[in-house]
Amino acid sequence: MKIALFGGTFDPVHRGHLAVARTAAEKFGLSLIYFAPADIPPHKQKRKLTDFQHRFAMLALATVDDKRFIPSLLDAHTGRPNYSIDSARRLKSSLKKSDKLYFLIGMDAFKDIATWRQSEELLQECEFIVARRPGHSLADVGRALPASLRPQEEILHALEKRRANGTVSLPGATIHLLDDVHERVSSTQIRAAARESVKQLSRLVPQPVAEYIKKEHLYVAGAPKTEAGGARRGNMLSLHRGISRSGKRE
């Protein structure tokens, strides 16, 4: 079985995330995609995020109609930053030996892969599916890699005019490029639409998510503040009792 791990803050999950997941599932024959919202994303610790319980609840609402999509508690309240290498290894340990794990990521995030903890090991743990953006070349993909895996500069220079598509196979890394997904959504758009009607907000996020955002007054001035420790854990765990830590529906 082919399985993908799709991590991120998902603040909130939107139509762009779902479009990337659907396109990846269809192109690469993925049976399951685990959406794993990070409680403490290493690269965004200074940014105030919407409380985990809300982000997870919105993911559960957004993915309920597609059996391939699993909202996962893999990175819920570990008490430390959610490093992708740890998340991938935890998920992989729950899979069968015959299963194949992919890591689904957008090009903007992949450009920082060299700064991630144990990035070389992560690239060896699973093959990457990178959703590219217009204007990126194969040289951009190569330059993003950790120094130990990065092609020589003369090779990168030759790739600058080559459109990023297909599969890049290197010693220690296999990267599949996912063609541009035509679903442009930004957090700025969502925050602006959160002040408008559910109908307008639903153009950016699934309607159940839009209704949740409006009901909880998220992404607007005066929104509820994040809760502390224990209360937050208890509330979040009550949201989706049928989902295990890895994300499997029980």
Image (tube, rainbow, N blue to C red):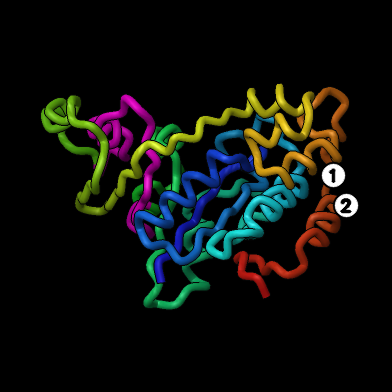
Q: Is residue 122 above or below residue 212?
A: below
Residue at image point 42% right, 62% down: 30
Residue at image point 83% right, 50% down: 232
Describe residue 4's horizontal placement relative to residue 198 as left or right: left
The spot of residue 138 in percent (x, y) is 23, 34
Nearer-the-camera pick, 160 or 204: 204
Task: Please tell me the numbered disc located at residue 231.
Answer: 2
The spot of residue 58 in percent (x, y) is 71, 48
Instruction: Please state which amino acid type lies under the numbered disc 1.
Output: Ala
**Contact between labelled residues 1 and 2, with CB atoms less than 8 Å apart:** yes
The spot of residue 174 in percent (x, y) is 27, 52
Location of the C terminus by quadrant is bottom right
- The magenta-colored residue range is 123-149
Asked whether the viewer can see residue 115, the reply is no
Res 211 → quadrant:
top right
Instruction: Please state which amino acid type lies under the numbered disc 2.
Output: Ala
Location of the N terminus by quadrant is bottom left
Task: Please tell me the numbered disc located at residue 228.
Answer: 1
- Residue 137 belongs to the span the image colors magenta: yes
Residue at image point 74% right, 37% down: 50
Q: Name the secondary structure under disc 2.
A: helix
Task: Please tell me the numbered disc located at residue 46.
Answer: none
